[in-house]
């Protein structure tokens, strides 16, 4: 009954199974169920769940909404590229555009307040990777993903693009300030 | 079609002429692709190693695309074709069905893989393995992949046909052997995978030549992963089959229970594909219910299957060793295992590294909420280098040490170097995978040319530990490449200069079915009621590591910003 020969017992599916094997199968099953329940538990009691609020959109439509938001809430401009720093109203909506190769604009948030951040891409897939917090979200063109975020720490945070998006991928770095 | 059969005097395996030739050519081409993949690996690792940064960005992304495709597709699937022909025609002692179609398989895959590589190295198709639309590659990039996939599909067809031939010609009694069963699992998953691939690659090809205007980016991701992840489940089934094969040949191990092991293979077929949904956990729009159903409920049945193999494979080894009299204490069977045999040591390192590093990290990555901590970070390549490289590639390397003497009739050159190779490659790759995961846990992104973000409007400084991990990735990555190069040298060298071995008698008639298989007179149990306490300790260690690491990651998650 070697693994490279046909089983000697023609009715191999009728063989009894050894106790230790049953035990291990049972443990593996129970552990799988614990992991299954853990995800559901976290949906109910955990505080970090990714939103599935998302809408189909177009780059033009999303950019128009974002530009309106930027025009209304910009508080200053930074770097030689004059990137607007936009204070997102507490409890309100903030827009973040991903495109080759920048995150636009810079958002300013307050610790402990909840925000609805809208993410979308103007061109390719991009990756929203908030550092050093380490939250990673896929940003897909044609889709507007609305994520509720509550910063729990203050400081300057970087948004690294972690989905390959072409030759300038490594220079695609954005910023979020939390006061 | 007339054919002859050769019985290898050393192993007793019986090779049919057509199948033998196809196995040889598929295996040789596989090794050539591994060579290309290995050369590109130098470019990748020496660029990501912050102290060297060998290539400029455009070349880096080109080389990285080639590395992914040549390793994950070309090397592995060519080798799997050889495995399929072996598991059907050799193990069932029968002729290959439709050998001409076998050559169609071979040439389609050769033409396809070369075409895709030409597209990549022309520099206009640096779209990575995933080639997410709307990023576009040259049309012959997609066309090459399609031809390659059609070839592989035909290979599966020849495999299924051979099973039918064996059944009809009654070349075996009862059920097919376990290893063939594992290969059958791989082939069934391959068919599903390739059809999904056709579902996305055909429209993408038409889009690249301008016949289709637009492909939805999210839809592409969803269908593509039906191909992308499932294709790796072909590998898992194939290398698990090899885990059963090598101890059977080297130490005469037999499965503890046919029912349990075959049941676990069956669970792969039923559940693994659905697990590919875990690539979409951080995407917009998927409902929580959909994510939980696919990635947890279904995936955990597949995980359970792997955990079962993780018990039954070392258990079979332990039972075989104990029957030989290595019964002292918990681990005499393990200490006295044939560690100097590279086929065995390679297989065992593959088992341990896949289980502890690849398996655990895979489940953690596939957990809906925890995924947010690692999605698209360097953790992801860390995970698949421990599953696909120390798992599949090392298992394939290990089985080659058995195939060169029997299939190619050559003695391996430099037996001492052969002994070292699996340790060098397997251990270095395991450490590389581990430090890659470490860097990913600190947030370092994958597919990224420059950790220092040159040219960016801002600065961001990674923690010092991240640089340390990336340096270690480089260092151990280079050792892995040396281990891989050594393997290629040993295999190619043996084919060219190894001592010629006796081929064995050739006849135009298949040898009759062996009257009784060795264990026919043994008890019902494969283990002969031999207890396997050592294996129990090993799997408990796996479980404890698994549980601890799983909950540590929930702790990490609970410390990030609140999200909903």
Image (spheres, coloured by chain):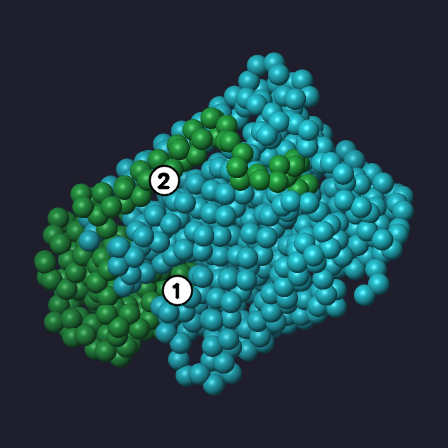
Chain colours: A green, B cyan
Marks 2/1: CA–CA distance = 25 Å
Image mark 1: chain: B
Q: Which mark's residue is nearer the viewer, 2 or 1?
A: 2
Q: For the point 38% across and 67% down, which residue is it?
A: A125
Element carrying mark 1: helix
**B274 or B110, which lies in front?**
B274
Q: Establish whether labels 2 and 1 are both on one chain.
A: no
Give the residue at mark 1: B222
| Mark sitting on residue B442 | none
Q: Residue most toward the bottom?
A: B211
Q: Which of B24 and B516 is in front in this view?
A: B516
Nearer to us in this view, B13 or A126 = B13
Residue at image position (32%, 52%) is: B293
* Residue B191 percent location from the top left of the image: 54, 62
Q: Mark 2 lies on which chain?
A: A
Q: Vertical placement of B147 versus B299: above or below? A: below
Q: At x 26% / y 79%, what residue is drawn? A: A60
Q: Is residue B115 visible?
A: yes
* Residue underneath mark 2: A32
- Which part of the image, by quadrant, shows the N terminus of chain B? bottom right
């Amino acid at each position: 009954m070697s693994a490279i020969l046909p089983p000697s017992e023609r009715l191999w599916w009728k063989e009894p199974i050894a106790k230790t094997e049953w035990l291990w199968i049972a443990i593996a099953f129970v552990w799988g169920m614990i992991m299954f329940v853990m995800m559901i538990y976290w949906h109910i009691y955990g505080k970090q769940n990714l939103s599935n609020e998302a809408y189909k959109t177009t780059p033009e439509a999303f950019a128009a909404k974002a530009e309106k938001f930027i025009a209304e809430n910009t508080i200053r401009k930074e770097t030689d590229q004059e990137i607007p720093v936009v204070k997102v109203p507490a409890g309100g909506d903030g827009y973040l555009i991903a495109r080759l190769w920048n995150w636009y604009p810079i958002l300013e948030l307050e610790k402990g307040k909840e925000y609805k951040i809208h993410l979308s891409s103007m061109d390719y897939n991009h990756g929203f990777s908030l550092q050093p917090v380490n939250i990673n979200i896929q940003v897909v063109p044609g889709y507007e993903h609305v994520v509720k975020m509550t910063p729990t720490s203050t400081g300057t945070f970087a948004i690294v693009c972690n989905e390959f998006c072409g030759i300038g991928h490594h220079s695609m770095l954005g910023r979020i300030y939390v006061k | 079609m007339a054919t002859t059969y050769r019985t290898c005097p050393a192993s007793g395996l019986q090779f049919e002429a057509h199948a033998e030739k196809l196995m040889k050519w598929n295996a040789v081409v596989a090794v050539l692709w591994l060579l290309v993949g290995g050369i590109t690996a130098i470019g990748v690792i020496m660029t990501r190693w912050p102290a060297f940064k060998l290539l400029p960005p455009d070349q880096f992304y080109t080389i990285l695309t080639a590395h992914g495709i040549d390793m994950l597709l070309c090397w592995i699937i060519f080798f799997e074709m050889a495995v399929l022909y072996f598991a059907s025609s050799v193990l069932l002692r029968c002729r290959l069905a439709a050998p001409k179609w076998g050559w169609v398989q071979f040439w389609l895959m050769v033409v396809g893989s070369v075409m895709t590589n030409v597209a990549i190295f022309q520099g206009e198709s640096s779209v990575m393995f995933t080639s997410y639309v709307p990023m576009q590659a040259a049309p012959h990039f997609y066309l090459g992949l399609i031809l390659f996939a059609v070839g592989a599909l035909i290979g599966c067809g020849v495999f299924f046909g051979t099973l039918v031939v064996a059944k009809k010609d009654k070349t075996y009694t009862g059920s097919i052997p376990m290893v063939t069963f594992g290969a059958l699992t791989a082939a069934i998953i391959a068919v599903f995978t390739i059809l999904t691939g056709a579902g996305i690659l055909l429209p993408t090809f038409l889009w690249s030549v301008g016949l289709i205007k637009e492909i939805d980016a999210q839809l592409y991701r969803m269908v593509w992963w039906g191909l992308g992840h499932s294709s790796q489940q072909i590998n898992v089934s194939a290398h698990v089959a090899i885990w059963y094969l090598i101890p059977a040949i080297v130490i005469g191990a037999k499965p503890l229970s046919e029912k349990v092991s075959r049941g676990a293979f069956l669970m792969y077929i039923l559940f693994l594909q659905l697990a590919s949904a875990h690539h979409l956990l951080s995407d917009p729009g998927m409902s929580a219910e959909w994510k939980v159903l696919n990635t947890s409920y279904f995936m955990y049945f597949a995980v359970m299957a792997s955990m079962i193999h993780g018990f039954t494979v070392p258990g079979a080894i332990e039972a075989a060793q104990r029957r030989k009299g290595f019964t002292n204490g918990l681990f005499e069977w393990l200490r006295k295992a044939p560690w100097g045999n590279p086929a065995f040591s390679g297989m065992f390192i593959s088992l341990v590294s896949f289980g502890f590093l690849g398996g655990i990290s895979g489940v953690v990555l596939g957990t809906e909420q925890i995924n947010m901590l690692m999605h698209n970070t360097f953790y992801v390549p860390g995970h698949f280098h421990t599953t696909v490289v120390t798992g599949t590639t090392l298992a394939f390397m290990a089985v080659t040490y058995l195939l060169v003497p029997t299939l190619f009739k050559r003695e391996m050159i430099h037996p001492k170097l052969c002994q070292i190779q699996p340790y060098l490659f397997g251990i270095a790759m395991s450490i590389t995978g581990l430090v890659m995961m470490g860097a990913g846990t600190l947030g370092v992104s994958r597919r990224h040319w420059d950790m220092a973000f040159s040219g960016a409007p801002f600065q961001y400084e990674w923690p010092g530990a991240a640089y340390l991990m990336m340096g270690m990735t480089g260092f151990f990555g280079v050792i892995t490449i040396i281990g891989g190069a050594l393997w290629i040298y040993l295999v190619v060298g043996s084919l060219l200069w190894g001592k010629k071995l006796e081929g064995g008698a050739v006849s135009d008639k298949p040898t009759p079915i062996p009257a009784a298989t060795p264990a026919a007179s043994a008890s019902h149990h494969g283990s002969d009621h031999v207890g396997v306490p050592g294996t129990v300790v090993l799997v408990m260690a796996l479980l404890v590591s698994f549980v601890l690491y799983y909950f540590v990651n929930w702790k990490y998650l609970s410390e990030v910003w609140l999200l909903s």
